[in-house]
Image (cartoon, helix red, strand yellow):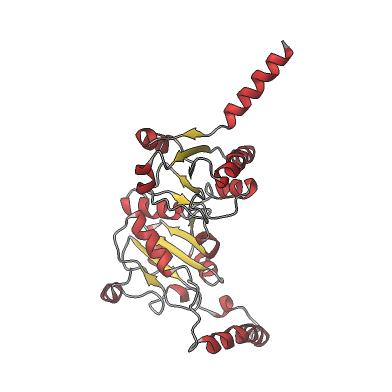
Amino acid sequence: MREVLLLLLCSLGARALAAVELAAAGFDDAWKANDLLLVEFYINGSASHAELESTLPAAIEEAKARGVRATYATVDIEQEPRLRKRFHVAMQGPHHDRSVVKLFRRDLPEPIPYTRAWSSHTVASFLLASTGVAARTLTSVTEAVDLTEGDKTVVIGFFETHDIKEYEAYTKACKAFLGTAVTEAVLFAEVLEPNLIKEFEVVYTPMTFIFKPGEDALGYTGKYEVVNLMEWVQAHAVDLVRELRPDNFLQLLDEVRAAPRRTSQARACQPQSPRALRPLHAPFSSRRLPPPRATRRRGRR
């Protein structure tokens, strides 16, 4: 009797950790029913699938222990070619059978690719990061000055109310970047008080700006849709790797060598911080915020 009970408990535990196998017919229902749906697109019999069969359930359990609930599901892309095509699943590896993992969230129109290490702890940390605060709400100009005077790129959205579709699209775009490499390089914030927006000298709303260290602000002039906003942020807020060519190699090498020296000299000659020397409204004056018409003429998105 005891052996039967132990066998039953083991069976229940195995079922609790088992993946939900999804097909095209019920995929959208599963997507809408789960805030965090971690899906492995696999080829049956591949080495990567065998590895993830234990890694991903362990990550789900670790995330649960840390207060985040997620669902683990799988899709056999040989049996479900429509899902493979729909979500642009390109198999990698020497035999083109390496699994692809994506995170689906019920309120986001596109999945978030998982591109980090295949360890249970790293996957669990990714799930935790995905549930963080998407955009920091600013309550004063001083707070924004401190934010934009740092060494990170900052994206700030200005909205007079949260009851508009533009604000919903902005928050979803910010949410889609949670846990990705973008949020390691870019900070997202929002301003929602009409009286506070006037202090920022923003001409009209809704409006979103990118503030990169040492550069003028760049305004968004496209449609407020999640995918469009994400593409704009990735194109303008994230620094791409610069291409090394024979004609620029020595110049870039000199820039890298000179950067630490310039930084140390500036610190030695500057008794006060840049924030203390600048007027309160400096980062948001017309010197940094482009006028709406000029921004539109450039047609930058």
User: Along the horizontal axis of the image, is 177 left or right of 117?
Assistant: left
Q: Residue furthest top?
A: 1
User: Along the horizontal axis of the image, is 186 left or right of 299?
Assistant: right
Q: Is residue 57 visible?
A: yes
In which quadrant of the rendered image does the N terminus lie?
A: top right
Q: Residue at x 32, y 75 (%)?
A: 291
Rendered position, 7 above or below 286 = above
Q: Position of residue 285 (x, y in %)?
A: 41, 76
Q: Residue at x 54, y 44 (%)?
A: 46
Q: Position of residue 48 (x, y in %)?
A: 56, 47
Q: Residue at x 42, y 42 (%)?
A: 78
Rendered position, 51 above or below 249 = above
Query: 286 or 90: nearer the eye?
Result: 90
In which quadrant of the rendered image does the C terminus lie?
A: bottom left
Q: Position of residue 14 (x, y in %)?
A: 61, 28
Q: Residue furthest front?
A: 95
Query: 143 or 219: nearer the eye?
Result: 219
Query: 162 or 73: nearer the eye?
Result: 73
Query: 195 or 107: nearer the eye?
Result: 107
Q: Position of residue 20 (x, y in %)?
A: 49, 33
